[in-house]
Amino acid sequence: MQPLNRTTAGITTERPIKVLQFGEGNFLRGFVDWIIDILNEKTDFNGNVEIVQPLDKGIYHLVNQQDGLYHVQLEGIQGGQATQETRLITCVAHAHSPYADYEFYLRQGENPDLEFIISNTTEAGICFEPADASLDTTPGSFPGKLTALLYRRFQTFNGAKDKALTIIPCELIEKNGENLRTTVLQFAKHWNLPQEFTTWIEQDTIFCNTLVDRIVPGFPKDTIAEIQGKIGFEDNLVVKAEPFHLWVIEAPASVAAAFPTDQADLQVKFVDDLTPYRTRKVRILNGAHTALVPVAYLQGLRTVRDAVEDEIAGTFIKEAIFEEIIPTLDLSAEELNQFANDVIERFQNPFIKHELISIALNSVSKYKVRVLPSVLEYQKRKDQLPQRLLTSLAAMILFYKGETNGEQIALNDTPEVLEFFKNAWQKNSAADTVKAVLTNQDFWDMDLTQVPGLEQTVAAELEKLQQQELARIA
């Protein structure tokens, strides 16, 4: 089998480097670069990507061995049907490491065609590191590297407004663009860079807050031989991903015009405020995961797909989403229902085995962030409590007992949470256990027994779940 490179694949198209990308990992290659590749095909974007390896160790050598080429394999459910699609990505031109050649890295800032910087350096990547004492040697932090490159660009083009860049971080933190700008400005001050540079960053450089959504399992090691046989190349950078994709970007109209995803039938939304989209994702996608886990697990189900396709658990979570979560959100009914239907299809993906026990990690804190806001908003809007979401809370309390149907549950939470539940389940009654959980303000930042009817509802649901468990054992 022949190796994959531009010669063997017959790829001769050359494009200017318009995007500098911090990160060579699966997500960026299976999401951002896939989108840029489609932009090149369907619009006049005509831009390639230069990848920066943000850490000292990585796979930039492997990217260059394949001349930046690799395949993205999409596998999932669309319109109720299982689908598979493979695409050869040609938009990555080259990759390099600032640790191997810092000057080469800085010269990327001198590129007159450069328009965008995109990153995914993990949630911990956007932070200020005082140990990065100078831009004369390679900074260890991503914002330090970015500041050094932006300063080189500022110097090269004498602070020209039209050479300022658009920064689009994909790190999974709220206000990621604003946080990155703040950190860059910290480095500018830390390194005593001129005020003119700070003004250029503040007034001319665009930092976008973003929300990204696509499951990217990565390299399909179990099926790689079969995939390589079909594509006819030895591709060691194949990325497996689900078909669903969503990228919400807070940016001015000029950015949307320069990155014309609206012309390519892509789920990329340029908005003035992404807050409702973040809330939608947290409440529907993440909230449904969290609400489903204890209910399904106590029924003996072990994967998300099995749970959603189960008559009882599947009906439960669909009704929770459409009847109790969606009514608490403010986007249009069309958008909310479409997103919810997409979520259900994603949960049913036969190509991804998503274990319920893995989602159960830190369930208490997840319930607080992902589900409790829906409970409280539903009560506020409807003047009644959402039955299914409180059934989930009762199931979570029972789940933290640590056993079901005579089997131990591999609970995974902080020692403090596990110790609390151990003591709570030694109370005289299940009702006392419920009271102990609901009044724990370290969990909820409030006393949930003060919500009218909530304590009684959760206690009643817990009693039902215990009776059902006894019936299954019998």
Image (cartoon, helix red, strand yellow):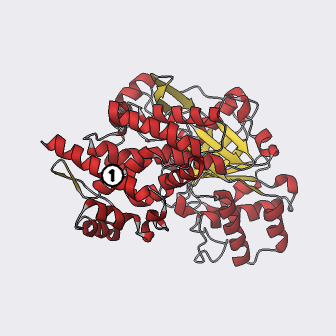
Q: Nearer the viewer, residue 207 or 434?
A: 434
Q: Residue visible at 75% across and 65% down?
A: 151
**Image location of residue 253, percent across then percent down:** 81, 44
Using the image as rendered, state which of residue 291 and residue 285 is in the foreground: 291
Q: Judge from the rendering whether residue 284 lies leftward or rightward of residue 312; answer left or right.
A: right
| For residue 295, above or below residue 433 | above
Q: In the picture shown, does residue 16 fall above or below 442? A: above
Residue 301 rendering spot, x and y as whole percentages: 28, 39
Horizontal and vertical percent for residue 142?
60, 63
Depth check: 197 or 472 in front?
472
Which residue is tagged 1? 460
Q: Is residue 471 left or right of residue 101?
A: left
- Marks counted in the figure total 1
Q: From this viewpoint, is residue 240 visible?
A: no
Q: Amino acid at mark 1?
A: Ala
Q: SS of the residue at dot 1?
A: helix
Q: Quadrant of the C terminus?
A: top left
* Residue 132 in sight from this viewpoint: yes
Q: Residue at x 29, y 45 (%)?
A: 297
- Image quadrant holding the N terminus, namely top left
Residue at 38% from the left image edge and 56% from the top image edge: 456
Task: Give the percent coordinates (x, y) of residue 442.
Answer: 43, 70
Is 347 placed left or right of 306 in the picture? right
